[in-house]
Each structure stands twice: as C-alpha cells, then as structure tokens.
Image (tube, rainbow, N blue to C red):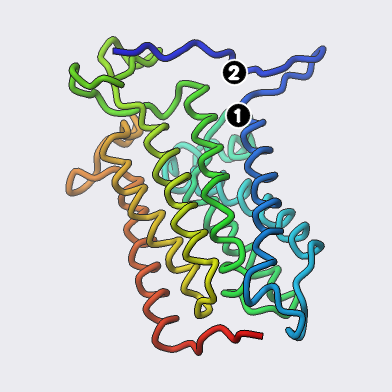
Amino acid sequence: MLIHPHIDPIALKVGPVAIHWYGLTYLVAFALFFFLAARRLRHEPFASVVQPKPWTRQDIEDLLFWGVLGVILGGRIGYCLFYKPVYYAAHPLEIFYIWQGGMSFHGGMLGVIVAMMLWARTRGRPWLQVTDLIAPCVPLGLASGRVGNFINGELWGRVADPSLPWGMVFRGAGDAPRHPSQIYQFLMEGVLLFILLWLYARQPRKMGQVSGAFLLGYGLFRFIAEYFREPDAHLGLLALGMSMGQWLCIPMIVAGMVMWAWATRRQPPAPAF
C-alpha cells in the first residue's frame, strides 16, 4: 500500500504572487499543443502549398489563443451546468470564482468546439479540417492536467482491493487504499490516445475521420477510467450505476462513431497535393 506524497500545491512563491503546480500544468499543456500543432503542419493536407489558404505558424498561434478561451470559458460553464446547476443558480456570481476550482473537460471540449467553429468561419476554412489539425495535439495536454490532479491529491479513485500493489491512500479520503485514477487517466486519455491518434493522423485521411477518432477514443478511455474514479460526492452514481462522467462520455462516443462513419462514406479522400 502506497501513501500519496505530500506535495505543496504552490510550486513557487514570489512575494504575494503564488504559482501553483496546477497552473504550470496548464502552461505545459498549451506549450505542447503549440509544438505538436506546428509539427502537424508537415502532414497532409496541411503541408500543401497548393491550398487556397496555406497553413502557417500564425494560424497555430491564433488557434491556441482561441482554444485557451474555449477551454477556460467552456470548462467553467460546463462544470457549473453539469455538476452543480442548482448551487450556481442560487449563487451566480460564484461562476466567476475560477480560483476556487471547478472545471469540466466535457464543457471545455464544447467550448473549444465553439471557438474553432468561430475561428474557422472568420478565416474561411473548413471546420472539420481545423478540428482534424488540432485533435492529435490535445491528449498530451490532457495528460499534463492529470499530473496536476495527482500533485494536488484530488479526483482520487475508488477504494481498491488491499492486495493491489499500487493502491494508494490519499489525504482526506480515509485510510483505505484507492486506485490512483489520475495515473490511469494520464496513461489512457493522455499517452495512449496521443500515440494512437498521432500515428493514425500521420497518413492522409478523409476530412472528419481524425476528429471522429478523437471523440470515440477519448470517450471510450474516459468511460473505462470512470469505473476506477470516485464519483463526485454531491452526485454519486446516477442511473444504471454510472457516474456523471460516464453519462457525458456516451454522447461523445456516439458522435465520434457517427462522424467517423459519415466522413468515411460521404467525404472524398484527402487530396495528395
């Protein structure tokens, strides 16, 4: 049985300014996105100089800015709507208290989708081509966020069998060993999903296939990980014994399957310029 290491959530403090590890993981996630998206410009169809509007690094910088807004706004609004709608309806001003915590991946994803739709429209680019570009660049950023969850000792797993070699006792979660679900999510939704998507997207694909593969892959891995993650205390398990995270993953899985099938059957192959 392991004991969760006590790690100060503040990585660096300079006078009144405190820099938290969790904030640093966000910065790492954004840096990884920029690096990987720039690499994606070498893949087809983005590498083609024959396109009506060739892709540039300036496009990546703009996408990152819009994406950050989508993550923050969507993540916060999604958390308030999905997890504590009654509370925030009674305390609407606390919606803006981001420093108190409370972000939803599914809300952040919806925020990014809206941001990418707006960006694509203003730049005159196909929306699915934009999402196909960014999809393989996202998982490692998610992995970085899970590292922050582990450092903070939050979002711990369900009680594990005492014989589990890596069962871990988390502060504030009682004395029973639990699954380190943050690590499971780091490995599945982050590292493994990145490897699979990156390899899949390196070859020319029909527009929308990569985006559909991301939705399907993340939805499946998150759904599995939720079986090891402790449900939110104020919600518990919902209908059919599933958590809120699992119920939110079902539309993702369905949407991913539909998008991938639609792209495969309806869209012409990506041109080889």
Is 183 on the left-hand or right-hand side of 269?
Answer: left
Q: Report which quarter residue 160 is drawn in.
A: top left
In this view of the protein, which residue sits in the foreground, 80 or 170? 170
Q: Relative to residue 149, is residue 3 drawn left or right? A: left
As measured in the structure, the alpha-carbon distance from the residue carrying label 2 to the one carrying label 1 is: 7 Å
What residue is drawn where x is 59% and y is 86%?
271
Q: Name which quarter of the figure residue 39 lies in.
A: bottom right
User: Label 1 near label 2: C-beta < 8 Å?
Assistant: yes
| Residue 72 x %, y % | 63, 46
* Residue bearing mark 1: 22
- 29 to 55, vertically: above or below: above
Q: Secondary structure at mark 2?
A: loop
Q: Is residue 136 above or below residue 130?
A: above
Question: Compared with residue 118, is residue 21 higher up or lower down, i.e. above or below?
Answer: above
Against 11, residue 203 (above or below) is below
Q: Which mark is residue 9?
A: 2
Residue 48: x and y in percent read 71, 79
Q: Quadrant of residue 38?
A: bottom right
Question: What residue is drawn where x is 62% and y is 74%?
Answer: 44
Question: Residue drawn at (52%, 31%), measured in percent from left and top?
Answer: 147
Amino acid carrying label 1: it is: Tyr
Q: Amino acid at mark 2?
A: Pro
Q: Crowding at label 2, few (<14), some or many (≥20) Cα neighbours within 10 Å?
A: some
